[in-house]
């Protein structure tokens, strides 16, 4: 006999609204249906009624964790539309902040995953590292979240003390390489809880349009930083970790390896950052036209489309966030799994309901 | 990928236009299902779809990725109806449901298009509906109402209810959620 079990909209692992209705046959999941939109804010609609300056502040609030990627993608869409060139130093600063944001996001998620697994010690290690990243982001931008760094044509603040950033990166890289990754890949508790659980096959990942670490843990080597490099990513050396197993463990390990890669990217960006201007001058006039931009956010590709009639208010803003694309992949992941694994599997895509419910 | 071959196979006359954000093409009367089949066969990756209100209908832009190049294929529809792609591109499912919520676009060929961002009983077309009410909304109405409310409160010897102006401004937002 089957039973329908509604889980949510209060999430069993994260404090955001989302509902998965699970059909179970005993302990085994045989069906699932996802509901979102509980916190729908119509940000696209709002953006079409505010001027570009206000929209920068608005899109930064699409997401609390990856706020920077939204202002960066929006700014790049405007730069594409208006043909604006960004000073070289600003491009390096954008890379540093974007990768620091990836560190923040991945460490936050790793901590939550450890807590869901029941590994409290590692949870505290991850959150201690995350705190150090947030301190550095605060030192750069003045803010722990919503950094307000990007604007069309450049960035709003310079990195005045690169040494602080390098020290943080060195600490995180050392602890991640020596403690986090060995524990996540070899610890019996983690393996027992995550290996072979919530598998997303390569075929399903491709068909459902999975993005970011979720796709890369299922064997899809997708990364806009490599495929369509922006800013100065084509001048920096880094690997894109890809695993084939598609299970929760693979999604954990991909993100852990990406933490190390982000540290390498920040080191190179800080060391290679040229002197020069970082601001693009006054807020540029946006001509009539339309343009897109894509950025590899912590959870995957972020897409913006902006259309302008030449006024200071866009006529259309379209925002496609990575969790919006990744969320449907939870359904094939949970099928055949036990009910007790559903919260962990949901959390393993690093879902952001704020992004989804733009 | 041979993007020109795909253009010819779809019978699109206009050439691809290279822009900073990728390749763009205008395709009036586009056979959207043929486009989806051809691009999937060519290993292109679905990115998303943009719907915008346009004079006399809607502008639809289908965004695909091929080896890092963004392809944006634009077409126009007079009626809010277009063929669904979900049997060819399962990843289009949530996007179609979202566009039904925002613009009441009907995606034909689906067994149903449940609400995604709205609740099941909400009327689809939220953005179109609110766009009309905002266009017809005159801020002066609020001032007039506030003054009338103040006059009425004064003549009745009491303060105007604090939420009257909220109620007045709420008129234009009626039906948002």
Image (tube, coloured by chain):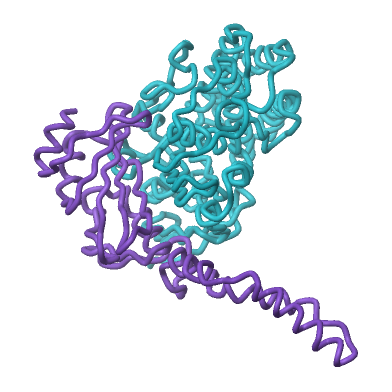
Chain colours: A cyan, B purple
Residue B78, by quadrant, is: bottom left
For the point 31% across and 48% down, the residue is B61
State which quarter of the image contains the N terminus of chain A.
Answer: bottom left
Instruction: From the viewer's side, name the closer residue of A242 and B45.
Output: B45
Number of callouts in the render?
Answer: 0
For the point 54% across and 53% down, the residue is A43
Instruction: From the viewer's side, name the closer residue of B167 and A111.
Output: B167
Compared across the picture, whether B159 is left or right of A132 comes to right
The image shows residue B112 at horizontal and vertical percentages of: 30, 67
Instruction: From the viewer's side, name the closer residue of B31 and A116.
Output: B31
Compared across the picture, whether A323 is left or right of B38 comes to right
Residue A225, by quadrant, is: top left
The image shows residue B172 at horizontal and vertical percentages of: 58, 73
Instruction: From the viewer's side, name the closer residue of A327 and B172.
Output: B172
Residue A212 seen in the current view: no
Compared across the picture, whether A322 is left or right of A259 comes to left
């Amino acid at each position: 006999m089957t039973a329908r079990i509604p889980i949510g909209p209060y999430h069993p692992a994260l404090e955001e609204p989302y509902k998965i209705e699970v059909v179970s046959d005993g302990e085994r999941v045989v069906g699932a249906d996802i509901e979102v939109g509980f916190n729908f804010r119509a940000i696209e609609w709002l953006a079409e009624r505010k001027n570009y300056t206000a929209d920068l502040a608005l899109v930064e609030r699409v997401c609390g964790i990856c706020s920077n990627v939204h202002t960066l993608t929006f700014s790049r869409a405007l730069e594409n539309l208006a043909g604006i060139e960004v000073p070289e130093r600003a491009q390096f600063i954008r890379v540093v902040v974007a990768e620091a944001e990836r560190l923040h996001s991945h460490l936050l998620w790793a901590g939550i995953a450890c807590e869901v697994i029941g590994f409290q010690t590692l949870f505290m290690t991850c959150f201690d590292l995350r705190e150090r990243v947030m301190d550095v982001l605060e030192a750069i931008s003045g803010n722990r979240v919503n950094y307000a760094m990007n604007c069309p044509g450049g960035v709003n603040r310079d990195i005045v003390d690169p040494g602080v950033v390098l020290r943080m990166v060195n600490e995180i890289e050392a602890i991640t390489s020596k403690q986090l990754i060995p524990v996540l890949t070899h610890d019996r508790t983690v393996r027992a809880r995550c290996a072979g659980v919530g598998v997303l096959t390569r075929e399903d990942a491709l068909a459902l349009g999975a993005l970011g670490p979720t796709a890369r843990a299922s064997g899809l080597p997708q990364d806009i930083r490599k495929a369509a490099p922006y800013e100065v990513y084509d001048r920096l050396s880094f690997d894109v970790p890809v695993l084939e197993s598609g299970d929760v463990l693979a999604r954990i390990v991909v993100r852990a390896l990406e933490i190390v890669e982000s540290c390498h990217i920040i080191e190179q960006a800080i060391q290679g950052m040229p002197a020069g201007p970082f601001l693009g001058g006054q807020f540029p006039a946006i001509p009539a036209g339309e343009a897109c931009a894509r950025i590899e956010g912590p959870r995957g590709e972020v897409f913006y489309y902006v259309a302008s009639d030449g006024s200071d208010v866009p006529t259309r803003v379209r925002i496609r966030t990575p969790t919006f694309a990744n969320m449907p992949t939870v359904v094939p992941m949970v099928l055949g799994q036990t009910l007790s694994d559903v919260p962990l599997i949901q959390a393993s895509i690093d879902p952001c309901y704020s992004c989804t419910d733009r | 990928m041979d993007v020109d071959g795909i253009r010819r196979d779809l019978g699109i006359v206009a050439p691809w236009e290279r822009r900073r954000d990728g390749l763009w093409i205008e395709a009036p009367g586009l056979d959207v299902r043929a486009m989806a089949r051809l691009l999937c066969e060519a290993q292109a990756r679905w990115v998303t779809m943009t719907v915008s209100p346009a004079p006399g209908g809607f502008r639809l832009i289908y965004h695909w990725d091929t080896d890092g190049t963004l392809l944006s294929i634009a077409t126009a529809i007079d009626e809010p109806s277009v063929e669904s792609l979900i049997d060819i591109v399962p990843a289009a499912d949530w996007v179609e449901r979202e566009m039904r919520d925002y613009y009441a676009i009907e995606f034909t060929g689906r067994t149903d298009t449940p609400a995604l961002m709205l609740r099941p009983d909400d009327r689809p077309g939220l953005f179109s509906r609110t766009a009309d009410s905002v266009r017809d909304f005159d801020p002066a109405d609020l001032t007039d109402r506030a003054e009338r409310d103040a006059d009425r409160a004064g003549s009745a010897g009491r303060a105007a209810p604090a939420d009257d102006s909220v109620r007045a401004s709420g008129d234009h937002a009626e039906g948002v959620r």
